Amino acid sequence: MAESTKYIFVTGGVSSSLGKGIIAASLAKLLQAEGYRTTIQKLDPYINVDPGTLNPYEHGECYVTDDGAETDLDLGHYERFLNVQTSQANNITTGRIYQSVIEKERRGEFLGKTVQVIPHITDEIKDSVQILGKSGDYDIVITEIGGTVGDIESLPYIEAVRQMRWDLGRHNVLVVHLTLIPFLSAAGELKTKPTQHSVKTLMESGVQADVLVCRTEHELPEDLRSKLALFCNVREEAVIQAIDASTIYDVPNLMLKQGLDKVVLKKLNLERSEPNLTRWNQFLERHKNPKGEVTIGLIGKYVELQDSYKSIQESFIHAGAENEVKVNVETIHSEHLTKENIAKKLGHLHGILVAPGFGERGIEGKIEAVRYVREHNIPFFGVCLGMQMAVIEYARNVLGLTGANSTEMDLSTPHPVIDLMESQKNITDKGGTMRLGAWDCVLKEGSLVKDIYKTDAIRERHRHRYEFNNNYKSQIEEAGMKATGFNPGTNLVEIIEIPDHNWFVGVQYHPEYKSTVANPHPLFVAFVKAALNYKKEKNSVSMAQN
Ligand code: GLN
């Protein structure tokens, strides 16, 4: 335990997308494994109040916490690595900082003062960083600052770091700078100059980096480390190499080998012990030595950008390791699916997940996909919009309700099997107005999901507006699709399944947000297992036919 909370800032230089989130999460993992109560937060310098209104193409997936915060996808990495929950306090944007300062100004809290970036915005940033520290729940708070040092919009954050270091002292506030060491293949050389410049840019704002984490494609030779240390004014042991890894889950061990935890703890005057990474390494062992493989189709419309379905992809990694198989996730664009090509595009898959999403584009392809897997008894997992598509498909093709749809896609549908709740109908704002965060759900006796979760009641995270329309429930259930999970307060349907099918589950919530290395999500584990069984059955049928 630390006497007072220690703060570590992770800043980035030279280039964006160097993986600050993974470095921060890996450092946090090591510190946690050494017994320190550690959390991570992310400060994003953009003006959106939260990333909820951002297109997934712009910023990847929007991650949702239990308390209903719509956050940056890095929080997903934090939870997956640490297995501790994050909340609204773990993700702050410039928009939220300004919103809060402006609200205070309107309430007259600044007593007639001129409200300025310094000190009002910087004070608000410092308060936001220290909220977690002051809770008494953590020994160490790691704060990742989005963007790149030198960006105009990062300046107030760097100034807040400078002030916090001045307020609390160097042994309580540490700055890790993640930078890039490019390799010039024509010269056959690694180059340190961009790093020197970015450390200098940080210095111009009065902040000296304590530790350099250097992203590189090649090993950093000794002389280059010494050069970096000398010119960037850090000790040689504080030059940490972050070489490209085959999986993000290797990074904590790579950082351990490089001594990142050691140098950080020394600078913070904290004791070091050997980290206990047993559970982590068991997972890695299984992940890297699969005994078989399955191929699962991920059908969505944001497939061009891998990060759009980050949590789903990671959930498959956790579930694969649990089943000791490699899960090949084949992303399929729903807009390209038609009745004519569906068998060709989906016929080889061992399971299909229809992804979450918004708006009309690509939904007919998703419905076509559900029909194919339902009729061919291929394991199906529908997540949020994916569950809604399964209900629409069933209504149209099994119940014969022509034109059945969600009112999100077709306001004048004759059969709104998916619809807005009354209480949602008058809401016009888009930001933060969905059903968000963790909601209770009771599981039906005898259902597949109850068997999978092995409990009566669960809490899962939501992010959607539209709901299963209970006016159609009895018709749908009579035809064979069952509602097996309910919100106990509102009676909203949270889960549907088809008992006569091989494995057919649709959930209105997002199970992917709760899958972690230490706790792979039971539904993903069961779905991968079902895919594996399906593959075995299919192989034995084709062998028998030969
Ligand atoms: N667009 C759907 C809704 O708002 C589903 C959202 C989602 O998949 N997250 O209800």
Image: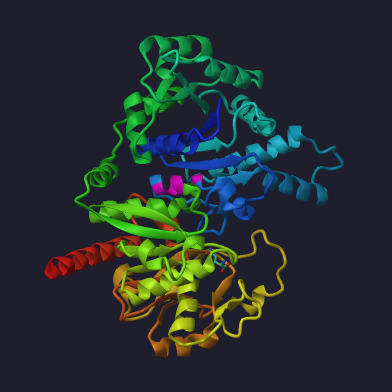
Q: Residue furthest right?
A: 112
Point out residue 184 in the picture as x, y percentages from the top left corner: 46, 18
Q: Is residue 439 visible?
A: no
Point out residue 282 in the picture as x, y percentages from the top left corner: 24, 45
Quadrant position of residue 478: bottom left
**Does 201 lie within the magenta span?**
no
Is the stretch drawn in magenta largely helix, strand or loop? helix
The answer to whether 426 appears left or right of 55 in the picture is: right
Point out residue 104 in the picture as x, y percentages from the top left corner: 77, 48
Q: How is the image coloured?
A: rainbow
Quadrant of the image where one finds ligand 1: bottom right
Residue displayed at 55% across by 30% down? 11
Q: Is residue 386 visible?
A: yes
Residue displayed at 68% across by 30% down? 155
Point out residue 82 in the picture as x, y percentages from the top left corner: 40, 45
Depth check: give the residue in front, 370 or 9. 370
Which portion, as a residue range, is magenta?
74-80
Q: Residue furthest front?
A: 340
Vertical position of residue 202 compared to residue 40: above or below: above
Vertical position of residue 147 compared to residue 414: above or below: above
The answer to whether 44 appears left or right of 363 in the picture is: right
Depth check: give the residue in front, 97 or 149. 149
Vertical position of residue 101 compared to residue 168: above or below: below
Residue displayed at 41% across by 74% down? 371
The C terminus: image quadrant: bottom left
The answer to whether 340 appears left or right of 50 in the picture is: left
